[in-house]
Image (cartoon, helix red, strand yellow):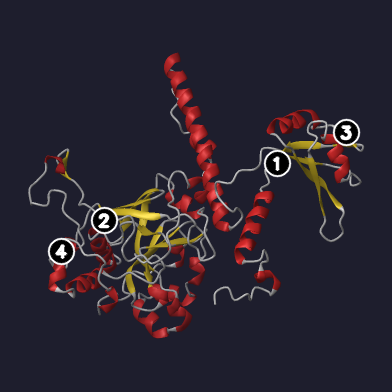
Amino acid sequence: MSILLETTFGDLVIDLDIEGSPALAKNFLKLVAARYYTNTLIYNVVPGKYSQMGDPKGDGTGGCSIYGLIDSYRSLPSSTKSKTSISPPPDVTTSQRRFLQSHGRQLNSSELNQKGVVIAMEMGNVPHTIGSQFLITLSENNGLNDLVPVDFEEMTNNGDRDNNLDEKGGNLRSHKYLSLGKVAEDSQNVLSKLNRAYCDDDGRPFADIRIQRILVIHDPFDDPSGMVDLLKWRGVNAADEKGNGEKSEKDDFNGYPLAPQSPGYERPPEETVAIRIQADYTTLFATAGWDDEENISQLPNNDEEDEEAKQKRLELQKKQEEEWKKKQDTSRAVMLEMLGDLPSADIQAPENVLFVCKLNPLTNDEDLELIFSRFDRNAKAEIIRDPDTGASLQYAFVEFSTKESCNEAYLKMNNSLVDDRRIRVDFSQSVAKVWDRYHKRYRNELGGGVDRGFLDGGNSGRGR
């Protein structure tokens, strides 16, 4: 039995292991039917190993089974149940059926070593704490098979798995991977994109990657008691039903019923982590290692098209290429701002400053100012020196009064001879001057133009 998992990076088709782990598969299918995964975060990515998801809180501490979800909604006051949707959602921690028993087919080392294996997760490796969370392996040779004890292989051959593992304890019990399914189709290379996601130290991607929704392709299990009311409380209406119970002409597509409607929120009400920029086609470049040239090559190209159509296609291709590059630059600037390498993503390098390199170590500031004064009498040169020895690092920045004089100096001074050295001149991409003004303003805001945090080792008491 299969489900369609729609993510920010594309779609995955997953075949569930209903024979090996029927209870886990049923729990997963019913949570999908309740739209429990809609817009939840892929909150942890370990490159070369796996990605974790399925927690509406977004930090790995939330989630529950379908039975715990039904119990939590049943425990609400009757006045609240009369509403078509409930916000904020009830507390799932109050249910005694929040988690399932860790019973299912345990994966062996060879299976764990495959790409696209879907594994049911226990909460913090605590036995019998399976809820809604799961992980997907992102590559082969991911290292998870190394955590399976040798004794497990012997017990598998002897037909004894779950009971003996529970009795053994220790390392033998701490790494129990239960099969939930396997990725059957990944035509959009979603797993490869996730594997290249840019993450912080905790494994969370810098740009929010979400499960947009999951659709059930086939569900062989009967609904548990209370499922109908749960769908109503969560605002999951059947596609052939409107508010007044009438059927719409648009509720069928080629004779097939449409998928049920999902709750209308951009992030789960349970989510507690801070919001980050949303990963989309403008941030895929920075978050998943996309190559714009690779995607440009995928544009349609028909050798038999006429000249007019070909010209339009080339113009469209050029326009898309420019847009991709602009979006790539923007997303990279946003990443640098998040990392603290830029004061603002919108900052631009000055257009009246030249970068000069390959200087003679004996060349000084006055020499450069004299040479470049032929283009601007007010030109200012600064040779960058070693902070300890004061020796020239053989490159400098020259600032001009106008953009025009800067352009003229660039055209005439590149590859010129200065103090027996052939110098190179280019337009500066440094924002150091802007950083200086930013830090100066920051120090002035602290009072007296002095950053007390640096003078007393950071114990300035600003938070007191």
Residue 409, placed above or below residue 369: above
Q: What element carries label 2?
A: loop
Verify CB contact (< 8 Å) between mark 4 and mark 2.
no
Callout 3 secondary element: strand
Q: Are marks 3 and 4 in contact (CB under 8 Å)?
A: no
Of residues 80 and 440, the one nearer the viewer is: 440
Between the residue at mark 4 and the residue at mark 2, the CA separation in whole angstroms equals 34 Å
Mark linked to residue 109: none
Q: Mark 1 points at which residue?
A: 428
Q: Work out how far the residue at label 3 is from the one at label 2, CA to CA, in angstroms.
A: 74 Å
Please tell me in which quadrant of the rendered image residue 273 appears.
bottom left
Among the two numbered marks 4 and 2 on one chain, the one whose residue lies closer to the N terminus: 2
Quarter of the image containing the C terminus? bottom right
Q: In which quarter of the image is the N terminus?
A: bottom left
Q: Distance between the residues labelled 3 and 1?
A: 20 Å
How packed mark 1 is, by other alpha carbons closer than 10 Å (few <14, some 14-19, many 20 or more), is some
The percent coordinates of residue 261 (x first, y second) are 21, 52
Which mark is in front, 3 or 2? 3
What residue is disc 3 on? Answer: 417
The amino acid marked with disc number 1 is Ser
Amino acid carrying label 4: it is Lys
Q: Earlier along the polypeptide chain: callout 3 or callout 1?
A: 3
Q: Is residue 52 left or right of residue 462?
A: left
Q: Which residue does the numbered mark 2 point to in the structure image?
A: 1
- Viewer-side residue, 158 vs 440: 440
